[in-house]
Image (cartoon, grey):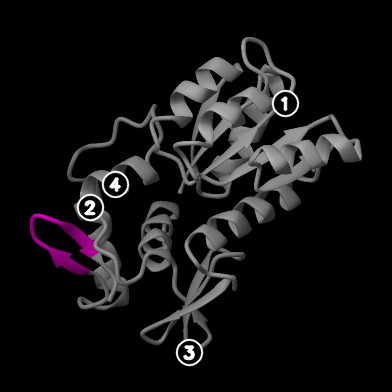
Amino acid sequence: MRILVIEDDPGLRRSLSATLKEEGFAVDQAADGEEGLFKASEGLYDALVLDVMMPKLDGWQVLEQLRPQHTVPVLMLTARDSVPDRIKGLNTGADDYLTKPFDSDELVARIRALIRRTSGKTQSQIEINGLLLDTARRSLSKDGQEIELTAREYSLFEYLALHRGEVVSRSLLYERLFDENDNSLSNLLDVHVSNLRKKLGASIITTRRGHGYCIE
């Protein structure tokens, strides 16, 4: 999953990005509203973390310009904690609203919940062909035994699981699993798919040649 953090405070922006990367997300950053709107408009993200008080464009303006074309989940993260501000944020198009100071675990949980809802999943646990995926714990198990996956293998499986039944193109997987600073080799996706098949069974991920990958 790929997240865009739009925050003008460089220390908080780096801290947020580090926290989200530790949780397995690919993370891009924007230092003001104008840069944030430009990146968000590319449509590459599974969720946005959006500050309100920023130079060039504030968070309200970013949302107003973004919403007519994009439905990406947006969590507003701001020091403005009044009820009118919360209402304005939600009415402008934010999907969630969290005030500073905040708890990192709560922020991550809210982002995961937003992504699940966007994928049509309301529960954190998903059963797939005898496997149990727990998106809250970022774990995959079978018959109560946890299966060891690398962070990138887990992210790949989770993305396909949340879009079960859909053929996901290679280009989309690269966009959603790698951030803008990642210079991974072009065959790295094939390596991760191969590793997942070795660990989970050859039939767990179907290749649709010329189209992409799918979990049936």
Q: Secondary structure at mark 4?
A: helix
Front of the two marks 3 and 1: 1
3 or 4: tag closer to the N-terminus: 3
Could you tell me how far apart the alpha carbons at marks 1 and 4 are, in whole angstroms? 29 Å
Quadrant assignment, res 159: bottom left
- Mark 1 lies on a secondary structure that is loop
- Residue 196 placed where, x, y %? 30, 66
Reading the chain from its start, which is encountered first: label 1 or label 4? 1
**Viewer-side label of 1, 2:** 1
* Mark 3 vs mark 4: in front: 4
Look at label 4 and name its amino acid: Leu
Q: Amino acid at mark 3?
A: Asp
Q: Which mark is drawn over residue 172?
A: 4
Residue 162 magenta: no
* Count of marks placed on residues: 4
Near-viewer residue (136 or 196): 136
Residue at 36 percent of width and 85 percent of height = 129
Magenta: main secondary structure: strand
Q: Badge 1, how many Cα within 10 Å: few under 14, some, many 20+? A: many
Residue topped by disc 3 = 143
Q: Which residues are magenta?
A: 206-213
For the C terminus, the quadrant is bottom left
- Image-quadrant location for residue 162: bottom left
The residue at which mark 2 appears reads as: 169
Residue drawn at x 67%, y 37% is 92
As drawn, which residue projects farthest toward the top?
56
Up-down: is 110 above or below 202?
above
